[in-house]
Amino acid sequence: DAGVTQSPTHLIKTRGQQVTLRCSPKSGHDTVSWYQQALGQGPQFIFQYYEEEERQRGNFPDRFSGHQFPNYSSELNVNALLLGDSALYLCASSLEQGVTGELFFGEGSRLTVL
Amino acid sequence: AQTVTQSQPEMSVQEAETVTLSCTYDTSESDYYLFWYKQPPSRQMILVIRQEAYKQQNATENRFSVNFQKAAKSFSLKISDSQLGDAAMYFCAYEKYNNNDMRFGAGTRLTVKP
């Protein structure tokens, strides 16, 4: 049973560039959430996708956008990168009708903005 | 808004001994989940234990147990017989019932001394 997979694992960008991060949810899961984890801090909720629509959003600017595909996989896009966007980006999947509330996490994509 | 506070940035424990990690949260909801996640250096967040707010009985998973005080909005994690493999960042998390928007504390770094 494949867990949550994310790509790429590491990437380096320069200020002003754009980046796309990808996530495949755990088999059978239909909901994908994205988190930003700055160094030494807890994950911060960016947004959640369900049925190919953004359902909830945290306190992040519009430079952060996403997409969910019919196969439930998801992308996170960040435009006009800033130095402060350097972080570990975590994808988490869950089941909309799940009863445990648990999120299953990938290993993350480490983004460095120079 | 719901917030999660972990007041211990770092904790240390001797192998085979017991350690307790603290967590408090703020919410006006009556139905919610609480979680402790472990994040080792490999980065992947792993669920340690979960608690449903409507259950008065404290959750237990092998060497891990919680002390859930709903009125005080406190949710501490006790690790018994600490092992070297328990060394990691531990995050306390809150999730409103039927809402996969999970909110995390800033984390506690646990060191286990041999």
Image: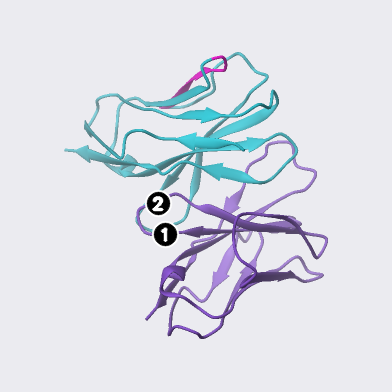
Chain colours: A purple, B cyan
| Along the viewing direction, whichever of A97 and A90 lies nearer the viewer | A90
* Mark-to-mark CA distance, 1 and 2: 5 Å
Which residue does the numbered mark 2 point to in the structure image?
A41
Left or right of A28 on screen, residue A20: left
Which quadrant: the N terminus of chain A? bottom right
Q: Are marks 1 and 2 in contact (CB under 8 Å)?
A: yes
Q: Chain of mark 2?
A: A
Find out whether residue B49 is within the magenta segment: no
Measured from the top left, where is residue B73 in percent x and y? Answer: 53, 21
Q: Residue at x 61, y 29 (%)?
A: B27
Left or right of A71 on screen, residue B20: left
Which residue does the numbered mark 1 point to in the structure image?
A38
Question: With respect to residue A12, does A93 lie above or below?
Answer: above
Three-letter amino acid code at disc 2? Gln
Magenta stretch bounds: B63-71
Find out whether residue B70 is within the magenta segment: yes
Query: Residues at marks 1 and 2, common chain?
Result: yes
Measured from the top left, where is residue B58 in percent x and y? Answer: 54, 18
Q: Residue at x 49, y 62 (%)?
A: A107
| Along the viewing direction, whichever of A40 and A83 lies nearer the viewer | A83
Q: Residue at x 40, y 51 (%)?
A: A41
Q: Chain of mark 1?
A: A
Q: Residue at x 31, y 40 (%)?
A: B9
Q: Secondary structure at mark 2?
A: loop
Q: Secondary structure at mark 1?
A: loop
Which quadrant: the C terminus of chain A? bottom left
Q: How many marks?
A: 2
Three-letter amino acid code at disc 1? Ala
Question: With respect to residue A48, does A16 lie above or below?
Answer: below
Measured from the top left, where is residue A60 in percent x and y? Answer: 59, 61
Question: With respect to residue B67, does A100 lie above or below?
Answer: below
